[in-house]
Amino acid sequence: MRKFTANYLLSDSGVFLKNGIVIVEEDGSAIEYLDTKGDLKEIAQMSFHNGILMAGFIFVKSSDFVPLSEAGNTVRSFVIHSATGKIQYSIQDLINLGKQIQDHFPEMKIPEIMNEIAEVLVSSVGFMREKDPGIFLLSGVDLPQMHFTPNARIKRIF
């Protein structure tokens, strides 16, 4: 088992943990999330990263549900438009859409954007969230303000 931590950690349930720890099997599957409540202590063989950690996941089309197109400049309309015609939605797709949403709704913060995208994909577009082995790091973000920047990028670290 391996342990990873970062400034923030996005758990499987969509909760952002400050200095949270994820424990990972050797195949890259997250098996446990630890909430340090922001008080991180050194632990042997734990790897710290600057940014936001996420365990691997993918959204997969689970039905033939066709969402009603939504007019207007809303987060929901951005998500529906982005997902139309797709049968899966990757972490990279999620980050790209998150950056677009941040440009249009600068008052929104990363946790709100990520959770809103996931909610719309599942409830309004007919996707299911599935675990996918791997640990990913979202870097190049404004951590104090919790905003995407043009330099934000996601990369697999395990």
Image (tube, rainbow, N blue to C red):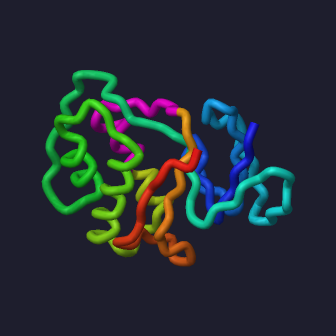
Where is residue 10? Give x, y as percent. 58, 52
Tell me which residue sits at (17%, 35%) in the image: 85
**Which quadrant would residue 29 be assigned to in this image?**
top right
Q: Which residue is at the front of the view, 68 or 49?
A: 49
Quadrant for the C terminus, please: top right
Tell me which residue sits at (44%, 54%) in the image: 114
Where is residue 65? Give x, y as percent. 23, 26
Q: Is residue 89 left or right of residue 39?
A: left
Q: Which residue is at the front of the view, 12 or 158?
A: 158
Residue 15: within the magenta?
no
Where is residue 49? Give x, y as percent. 64, 62
Q: Which residue is at the front of the view, 4 or 73?
A: 4
Tell me which residue sits at (50%, 33%) in the image: 132
- The answer to whether 142 is drawn above or below residue 84 in the figure is below
- State the extent of the magenta-drawn residues as a range: 117-132
Q: Is residue 49 left or right of residue 58?
A: right
- The answer to whether 35 is drawn above or below residue 106 in the figure is above
Q: Which residue is at the front of the view, 87 or 16?
A: 87
Tell me which residue sits at (39%, 72%) in the image: 149
Where is residue 13? Give x, y as percent. 57, 42
